[in-house]
Image (cartoon, rainbow, N blue to C red):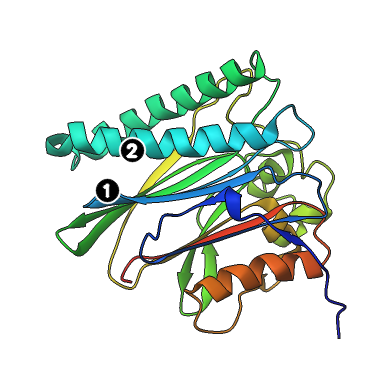
Amino acid sequence: SRTKVKCRMSESRVDNPGVRGMYGSSLCGKREVDEDFVACRDFGGVSIAVLCDGMGGAESGDESSKIAARGFVKAIGSLHAKGAKSWSSEGWRHKAYGKMVAMCHDAVNRMSGGPGRSGTTLTAVISTFEGTIPSFADIVHIGDSRCYILEDGVARLVTNDHSVTGDMQRAGYIEVHEIPETSGNNVLTRNIGDEKRSEAEILTIDLDSSSKFLLCCDGVWDPLHGRDGLWLPEQPLCSQESADRMTSEAIERGSTDNCSVLIVEIGA
């Protein structure tokens, strides 16, 4: 049996004011500071789940992730309130998300004193409902945190790692489970706050009442995504206990990074 690893919780890094069906957990782990930040909101007809991983070793990575996550959540609420009549237009939403990502770049750069001095990943799921019926979700993603869709107890990866090893995997040189072992796995090609003001990857998928998502940082998927896919706890998967179990399991399996997870259950 594995030796249990003591690790510090980071409750202040999970900003979830009781949003139904969203379960977040963040552990500082073996790091001195937790540079991850998780945030959730329900704006009535639209809900958002966002996970940001501040750049390890960069200046104020913990502040970058908090600024980006909270800024993006606030912008979603404002956008939906002002543009409810246009919300059904996929092109309109995608263009608006691009502007929000640009705003996050600006906010992080102001805080740090210029482009490239600090940074964060950002992975978000914005779910839209018609009344109480799930309709569609937009996934906005930049960096190497990940979004998985949970289906029949299996996690299906739907985002691309914006990293040197992510490029290698898409080119067919390595498999997804080989990324943690390959040189360059911690070198990002896109992130909030970079000098290129990189654009996010955006996709839209249909929802139903059984749809479930899992967002996690590299501190979690690095030790938990093996040859057979991402390790998941036993049922019930969509619960606070499962979110906590995943972050602690990542630490027990050797993660030396901060570990954060956000589980989203659409039909909760």
Whichever of labels 1 and 2 marks the residue nearer the N terminus, that label is: 1
The amino acid on which the numbered mark 1 sits, given as a three-letter code, is Phe
Judged left or right of residue 134, residue 30 is right
Q: From what the image shows, is residue 6 above or below residue 43?
A: below
Visible in this render: residue 175? no
**SS type, badge 1:** loop
Q: Which residue is mark 2?
A: 76
Q: Mark 1 and mark 2: span between their CA atoms?
A: 9 Å
Judged left or right of residue 49, residue 254 is right
For the view shown, which residue lies furthest in the left direction? 85
Most foreground residue, 173 or 17: 17
Residue 143 position, x and y percent, is: 60, 39
For the C terminus, give its image quadrant. Answer: bottom left
Mark 1 vs 2: CB contact within 8 A: yes
Q: From what the image shows, is residue 140 above or below residue 218?
A: above
Residue drawn at x 64%, y 13% as measured from the top left: 114
| Quadrant assignment, res 78 | top left
The amino acid on which the numbered mark 2 sits, given as a three-letter code, is Ile
Q: Which residue is mark 1?
A: 43
**SS type, badge 2:** helix
